Amino acid sequence: MGTKDIVIKLHNTKTRKKEVFEPIDASNVRMYVCGPTVYDRAHLGNARPVVVFDVLYRLLREVYGADQVTYARNFTDVDDKINARAAESGRPIGDITAETTQWFLDDMGELGALQPNHMPRATEYIPQMVAMIEDLIAKGHAYAAEGHVLFAVDSWKDLYGNLSGRSVDDMIAGARVEVAPYKKNPMDFVLWKPSTDDLPGWDSPWGRGRPGWHIECSAMSYELLGETFDIHGGGNDLMFPHHENEIAQSCCAHPEGDFARFWLHNEMLQVEGKKMSKSLGNFFTVRDLLDQGYPGEVIRLVFLQTHYRKPMDWTDKKAKEAEATLRKWRALTAGIEPASSAAAAVLEALADDLNSAGAIAELHKLAAAGDAAGLLASARMLGLLTDEMGAWASAPSVDLSAFEEKLFETRQKAMESKDFSEVDRLKAAYVEAGLEVRMSKTGVELVPGAGFDPAKLEAL
């Protein structure tokens, strides 16, 4: 089966069902994904949509050709969170956004994510946003009030809420909406807001100000992809209000288009079975994990083992298992030339609503069958087993035999003295160094984990 014969099916949030994906123009397949607000390091949850839509991007390139796919992912570099970070740090906003944008690209690169064709920054598209807002006012979908411009939800009331499946009345009842005297309807949302002298601002027909968050993606996607494009993606936390508001703005500004035909949303991420939060002490940035010794390739494989529409649980156990799997696969494919294309079963799994978990299961089958060439080609299709991602696996191994012998002898003495305090101390030190301790009657085995740090063994 050739790649041209593959039928891609995707779960469309807009219709709530899996549909056959047929691009508007097979020679220019277009996808837009909401990117980060750049004021800090990307946390683990921020990385999930990057990996999810990177796999979709790779699949589309495989099926339609690398030059026939256009992928845009934005950077929000004007935002109140950025302003707050600048105020508390005393650093210029431009310095913060430039630094954090590069952090994001570096960290996502460590996870094997290809860079999109376009990475627009909101501040580069202010004139286009102002023009779109003027157009919405002229068409009766927005109004100016006290230096603000707001989108009039009542002008789109029959269709507003279709993506998330809510009515306007339900949203008013259940949402925490900003109450402001200049709003005609509590659900009306800001397209433009005034800026004080100490905040970023641009001249506009409504005075010096800055754009609201939602208008950014509508203006940038229109400029880069047109009034109708194929796929719009992001985390399901963006479905309402961000994506709902994007649809309203874009369809009202460009009624001749359909905006995005397919909407894909990934589920959220947990850590060790709990929602990630700083209060629980389980909040990790991608850089935190990389610095702790978890290779980017290992993080990527853990992500891919869960379907994108299911909640994903990051656990240390999964990371250790993923590392062991990748070491085995890399050993099997060392010195092997990849097959001419990914295995049909792998492509079929991905074509079935981006079933990365099913694709990984197929990689295990290829490895079990000893098909090293097929495994290598298929894994690389998923962004795994690439040369760029393999430095961690080729790092020199550490001889742990002396440490194993020391713990075994210490335990033998403790069996006689009944004092196991030194055994417990050594075990704790080994675990702290990132080793898994396996003890049996015949000996001790120390297995390096994803966070193994040989330097921590030196003092022992």
Image (spheres, grey):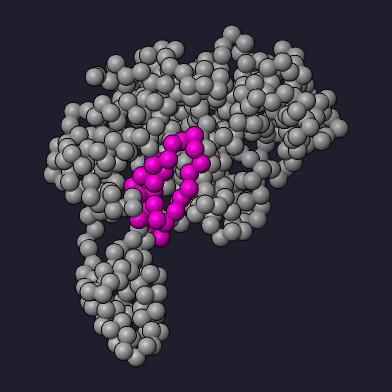
Q: Is residue 27 above or below residue 185?
A: above
Q: Position of residue 9 (x, y in %)?
A: 42, 21
Instruction: State which quarter of the image contains the C terminus.
Output: bottom left
Residue 149 seen by the camera: no
Residue 384 shown left or right of residue 86 in the figure = left
The residue drawn where x is 69% and y is 21% is 160
Instruction: State which quarter of the image contains the N terminus.
Output: top left
Image-quadrant location for residue 407: bottom left
Residue 356 shown left or right of residue 141 in the figure = left
Task: Please provide the residue range marked out in magenta.
Answer: 292-320
Residue 176 shown left or right of residue 372 in the figure = right
The residue drawn where x is 22% and y is 63% is 397
The residue drawn where x is 63% and y is 55% is 90
Q: Position of residue 336 (x, y in %)?
A: 14, 40
Query: Is residue 314 shown in magenta?
Result: yes
The residue drawn where x is 83% and y is 34% is 180
